[in-house]
Image: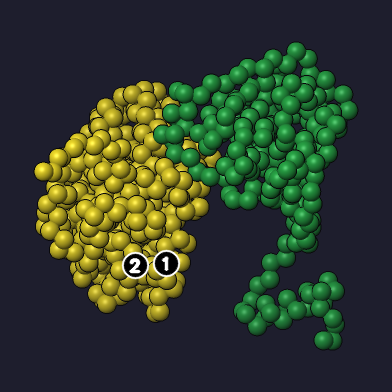
Chain colours: A yellow, B green
Amino acid sequence: MIVMMEVSQPISFNEKFLASLYEVVDGERIRTCLQCGTCSGICPFGYLMDFPPGLMITALRAEMFQEVMNTDSAWMCVSCYACTQFCPSKIPLTAGLMTHTKEELLLAGRVPSELQSALENSQRYGNPMGESPRKRADWITGIEPKVTIMGMAKRPVDVLWFVGDYASYHPRVQLITKAVARIFNALGVDFGILGPEENSDGDSQRLAGERGLFEMLAEKNGRVFGKYKFNEIITTDPHAYNALKNIYPELGISYPVRHYTQFLADRLEQLKPLLKNELNINAVYHDPCYLGRANGIYDEPRALLQAVPGLKLLELPHNYANSLCCGGGGGGMWLDGFQWEKAHVRMSEWRVREALTSGADILAVACPYEPPRFEDAIKTVKEANRLVVRDIAELLNEAMGE
Amino acid sequence: MDIVVPVKLVPDLVEELTIDASGAALDTMWLRLIINEFDDHAIEQAILIKERVGGKVIIVSPDAEGVDDLLFTASAKGADQLIKLNGNFEGGVNNHALGRALAALFKELKPDLVLTGVQAHNDLDGSLGPILAEYLGMPYIGYVSGVNIEAGKASVRKEYPGGLIAEMDVSLPAVLGVQAAEKPPRYVAISKVRQAMKTASIDDHLVDALESEGGAEISRMFQPEAASQAIMIEGDADEVATRLIDVFKELGVLESGG
């Protein structure tokens, strides 16, 4: 006779990790994984991972997740949501599996050094580049009428503009930020910015596994939002948009928020008469992951582009939900060297080659990560220098004759 | 193995520094403080030693804005005891005064090893390590980039200019000035720092009087003077290259007629 005995065993890392995935919204769907491999195939860097998403689930089921933790697979993930988008079982692969794996790697101290300094800078200075917080609003110099800084104006505004890190500090992206300010001014938008009081939205840090840092940054921003009166938040940064719309409310920080393309598309009738210059260009639009796949905003950016006189809108081979990431998400902005060592290729280069085959002269974007990434790629891809990268706001500005 | 690590906060150079109305000190109005980078390496080296041979790591820092965060972060990395020096530290103290205050405390703590950053950018009266070693009567080795502990002595790697490295043994207790830890200072997740804030405690140590005798007296501070030393060479690649070769010859970097 066989006697079954109940033996209480300590919970393994594998079990604990799996339990943490069940806590994510729709997390239990991981049980329904078919092992079809769609996720691993659609992942732009899946071919480089020892454990692409599908194989990570295999390892979990075999109680071998520690093996996954001993590889760099998760640090190749740019949180582009392609796997999540195409999973037939609708498993939250990006929000659950990939992000939680990065969190575990981070807690174990296994952080690539480039990423480490971006995280330390975010903690200390409120931006990943380690720039002085006092200089966060330096870009406003020369903009007329003057940009309102909430802490100095002490009056309610209609629109609180959450500017974001790269839009505030990166010299190339500042040009776009200024273009947006000029459009807002031309439309008579009553807006203000937080300036030195604004902190990084923290979303890419969260997706790079630093949940605690994200919460710290969100709480700081939440406290500052609470000081001022405004009707809605507008941002040019899809990553900030994603955080403010979907994740901050989990922390009790809840405000109406729109991406600037949504805000301007709503005012298209007011905007159209200002677009007087004929540009005569062929443009393709790159759907940013955090506007498109993560938040379903596809039509408003295109509506704005189609309103530009003389702009012929073409489409990229990978577009809408099938868009190809620029490589900057989920910590990718701070893992360029690390990922280059493994891949010897950049996602932004693939995208630039696609844009070249499409016959466009303009690669239109709507995310502050993209101009520096695509412009760098243009420098390294053969005969790519006929391609020009422009944010939608810059094209609108040019059409306005500014 | 008790390792004591004295660390200090120094002005953060990310913010522009301004000189106050006296003309002899930094304006503290906009001053942000950051851990001295070399002290951060000293903490890392101490924890690496503890992980290898066991023991206790004690972090000591004078009171300043941000010191609690610094101490709790060190705790989250693996430090066992946190000590804050309380006293008249506002406006900063020189290394002679800090050295005397620390030496008095260290005589009570009786550490086997004192690890500190080899230098700090605001050292005006020499670096802290040798001053401490003198007051404690211990040997000192600076520019250290690796430490092994065995049988009552430390084997250290000391860096020299020109890429030379010496390996030397020193009997314990000793003071070491750390140039670089064996590994870059580790990242510690914010959740772990927040946990440390709940579980770790900071011991307060009162410093009655600070004796700054022996330090430098500052009569005036200057902003770096702007000077135009750069020559901009215009023209196409050939013209620029020709002119560059001439410049190199004028400066004696290239032999003329070569």
Residue A72 is tagged as none
Tally the numbered discs.
2
User: Is residue A87 shown left or right of residue B169?
Assistant: left
- Amino acid type assigned to the residue bearing label 1 in the image: Lys
> In the structure shown, which secondary structural element does the residue marked by tag 2 occupy?
helix
> In the image, is A19 to the left or to the right of A369?
left
Q: Are marks 1 and 2 in contact (CB under 8 Å)?
A: yes
- Mark 1 and mark 2, same subunit? yes
The residue under the point 24% across, 37% down is A7
Q: Nearer the viewer, residue A103 or A153?
A: A103
Residue B253 visible in the current orientation? yes
Q: Secondary structure at mark 1?
A: helix
Q: Residue at x 33, y 64 (%)?
A: A49
Image quarter of the N terminus of chain A: top left
Using the rendered view, name the quadrant where residue B60 is placed. top right
Residue where numbered disc 2 is placed: A48
Please say if B258 is above or below B133: below
